[in-house]
Image (cartoon, grey):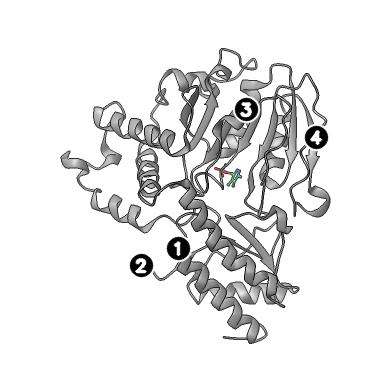
Amino acid sequence: MRNTFNFSAGPAVMPEQVLQDVADETLNYKGSGMSVMEISHRSSLFQSIIDETEENLRKLMNIPNDYEVLFLQGGTTLQFAMIPMNFMRNRKAEYILTGYWAKKAYEEATLFGDVNIVASSEDRNFSYIPDCSDLDIDNKSDYLYMCENNTIYGTKFHTKPNSKGKILINDISSSFLSEPMNVSDYDMLFGGIQKNLGPAGLVIAIIRKDLISEFVLKGTPTMLRYKTHADKGSMYNTPPTYNIYIVGKVIKWIQSSGSLEKMREYNEKKANILYDYLDKSKMFYGLADKESRSLMNVTFRTNSKELDSNFVELASRNNIISIKGHRVIGGMRASLYNAMPVEGVEHLVKFMEAFEKEGGKKL
Ligand SMILES: *Cc1c(COP(=O)(O)O)cnc(C)c1O
């Protein structure tokens, strides 16, 4: 096992087994004499990689047949524009504001239509998930938008919003494959893979097939229509072949560890180690309300900026990497994605205990 523990929010830690497998196949993939990065996307060898990746993702998430799985580019951020361009028939949509990324998505959507904020937790710096059981949704709205796990603030929806029959679109970038979810509760799920599934540069979108149509807002480029990608099996142009290959490996790694239920148990175990410590510490405290806590991103701080930066600096000398919080919130953030081993969290908590015991002084 490597001795550095990378708590980065993304790009993030990868399963060591996957890195090793990929290294073993770098020069010669399955006797082809080529690396996967050298193989034509039109070859049967690559076709079987993308087919198998999609098939295994469908099995793992239990994706119903009436949903399309698309491999897209442009990061999660491009989806913030593609969603309104493809779905805003009435030029009206509802957004739930639970953090930085939800707000970015909202702001992008305002370029295209009349966008309403139906719930928000901005009043308390996005430290909680607002009640979404009875939202005031306009009948004419085209969809309701949410971000399931708020990477920067460390909160997560634990119950699905009541969308009252509206199309429900969910950014799952930082909770993708971290636990089971009922795909058919949503009309579209999407996420960048660099948090939990692979290297940066690929977005996976899971969309109800009947929502993918000829309709787009006037002027929408060909590349930004879901239909373009659906019609061509995600190969309208050259897809990020190497990323698709690696995601395929990560999915197999999860499958070999059991199931998404198993993954959730493991992720709960890790998060609980850190949250339990935060709840009893006299120096560190968690930033998210208990009932809204994320399993993937744990945000915390001390009551002094100086102590915080001292902590981050000393942590890095103790093999604890990228523990600094996002600039908009400060403090610290430990991202505990699937590939973070339990040993990493134990190491972090031990270090926090020692730091607290020494009153934040040199260790
Ligand atoms: C990281 C992240 C994004 C932004 O992803 P990019 O691929 O950099 O555009 C959007 N939403 C969530 C929830 C994220 O965690």
Of circles 2 and 1, which is in front? Answer: 1
- Give the amino acid at mark 4: Asp
Residue 25 locus on image (x, y percent):
24, 48
Q: Earlier in the sequence, mark 4 or mark 3?
A: 3
Mark linked to residue 341:
1
Q: Would you call the spot at circle 2 few (<14 residues within 10 Å), some (14-19), or many (20 or more)? A: few
Of circles 1 and 3, which is in front? Answer: 1
Q: Nearer the viewer, residue 53 or 131?
A: 131
Q: Nearer the viewer, residue 250 or 195?
A: 250
Q: Earlier in the sequence, mark 2 or mark 1?
A: 2
SS at circle 1: loop
Residue 62 appears in view: yes
Find out whether the residues at labels 1 and 3 contact each other: C-beta distance under 8 Å. no
Q: Residues under labels 4 and 3: Cα distance?
A: 24 Å
Does residue 96 sit above or below 225 in this rendering?
A: below
Q: Earlier in the sequence, mark 1 or mark 3?
A: 3
> Quick check: is the Cβ at mark 4 less than 8 Å away from ligand 1?
no
Identify the residue under disc 3.
Answer: 83
Does residue 174 sit above or below 86 in this rendering?
A: below
Write down the quadrant of residue 326 in the picture. Answer: bottom right
Q: Is residue 143 left or right of residue 222?
A: right
- Quadrant in which the N terminus appears: bottom left
Identify the residue under disc 4.
Answer: 134
Q: Is residue 17 left or right of residue 331?
A: left
Identify the residue under disc 2.
Answer: 1
Q: Earlier in the sequence, mark 2 or mark 3?
A: 2
Q: Earlier in the sequence, mark 1 or mark 4?
A: 4
Q: Would you call the spot at circle 3 few (<14 residues within 10 Å), some (14-19), or many (20 or more)? A: many
Write down the quadrant of residue 40 in the picture. Answer: top left
Find out whether the residues at labels 1 and 4 contact each other: C-beta distance under 8 Å. no
